Image (cartoon, helix red, strand yellow):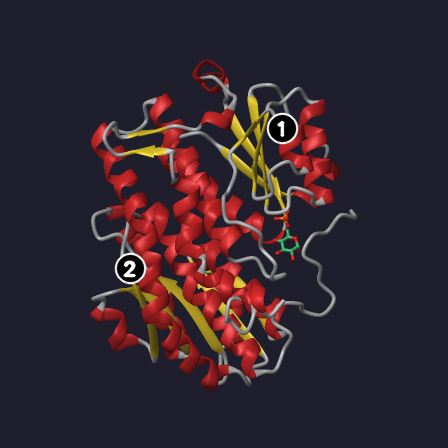
Amino acid sequence: AQAEKEGYPHFMLKEIYEQPRAVRDTIRGRLSMTTGQVSLPDLKLSEEELLKIQRVVIASCGTSWHASLVAKFMIERLARLPVEVDYASEFRYRKPILGKTDLGILVSQSGETADTLAAQAEMIAHAMPTLAVCNVIGSAIPRRALGSISTNAGPEIGVASTKAFTAQLAALFLFSVYLAQIRNTLSSEECYRLLSALGELPNQIDAVLRSAAPVCERLAKEFYGAEDSLFLGRGIHYPIALEGALKLKEISYIHAEGYPAGEMKHGPNALIDETLPVVCVATKDPNDPESVLKYEKTLSNIQEVTARNGRVIAVACENDQEISRLVEHVIFIPSTVEALLPILEVVPLQLFAYYIAVERGCDVDQPRNLAKSVTVE
Ligand code: G6P
């Protein structure tokens, strides 16, 4: 096993560092910059069939559920199609209203999660076409699906999912742009801007790994004694707050809660004191007015935390001087188009959780009570 870790102390750290490669392999061959087109040969759904779809319904669990929440923002914003996201374990038990103009998407690293399989069966029983976004080729979910977009992250060993997550986001982004092209909801200039941003992403993840790792290691030494923490984000960044909180709680056993930044005033503000670490995702695409607006709103939510002496750690874009003046700690990432920012934001949150767990002496690759693949309902 030591050899398989290729010199890294844990599989999780190795897999965090494999993310530039995982994303590169997931977009390879599916994106042509010369034609400005996405091609998804395994999709198995014709343009005609896709044009009949009136709603997308996604079911998944854990980290894959967070990727699905990000996909809701991507698909709704880029392809203007309504999207519902369910926990697979909740899906069947509320008698969902489904039909053949709905497209079902199952997002799963293993392709074997029992709840997600059961949700897929429910979709198929309602004559819905299903699409699998899975990392293990030949696993149960893609075998039962009509179409498939594989995430090519390679085998993931650490129980806490990292590279499979960023690969899922890349695959779901490709699908969103593909849908947008078919449905004619984006100009060709806009598509070009999105796809070239995707092409640059692997190098940007590399840059984040290099710049953020030492910062996260230092922050971990300061915050590892915390027993509670909050993670905040707004819009497409909210699922990343959830994912950051999940990473921290599952491997370090520190209680962590992800919350929409704008909801703090309806409860969690009561928890803030000078001991509480509050991790805030506050990034923006400066070329996108909606993204900037959301950032400004998040900034005022951060001010509410600092006014109560909460200890803010912000994830922000390079050159953001405004935020540096406002908060104690900032982890910088490069900027990109709004729909791809989540892929860069999550990397420092993975590293933060990792270094804290190491500092606390936890079994990073095999947290207590958890399994990599959950094949019981
Ligand atoms: C388990 C794993 C998580 C994973 C979840 C869903 O809880 O520990 O890392 O996100 O299952 O697994 P899947 O294979 O369906 O993505």
| Residue 360 horizontal/vertical position (percent) | 59, 82
Kind of element beneath mark 1 = loop
Look at label 2 and name its amino acid: Glu
Tell which residue pokes out farthest to the right in this image: 376
Report whether 368 appears left or right of 358.
Answer: right
Q: Quadrant of residue 262?
A: bottom left
Q: In the rendered image, which residue does mark 1 sit on? A: 145
Query: Which residue is at a point 64% across and 36% down the rendered structure image?
Result: 138
Q: Nearer the viewer, residue 89 or 93?
A: 89
Distance from the alpha carbon under mark 2 to that under mark 1: 42 Å
How would you rate the neighbour count of disc 1 (Cα within 10 Å): few for under 14, some for 14-19, many for 20 or more? many
| Residue 306 horizontal/vertical position (percent) | 37, 77
Q: In the rendered image, which residue does mark 2 sit on? A: 296
| Residue 289 horizontal/vertical position (percent) | 24, 47
How would you rate the neighbour count of disc 2 (Cα within 10 Å): few for under 14, some for 14-19, many for 20 or more? some
Report whether 11 appears left or right of 89.
Answer: left
Q: Quadrant of residue 74?
A: top left
Q: Is residue 102 above or below residue 324?
A: above
In the image, is the residue at mark 1 within 8 Å of ligand 1 by its beta carbon? no
Query: Which residue is at a point 35% across and 58% down the rendered structure image?
Result: 205
| Residue 10 horizontal/vertical position (percent) | 56, 70
Look at label 1 and name its amino acid: Ala
Report whether 298 appears left or right of 252.
Answer: left
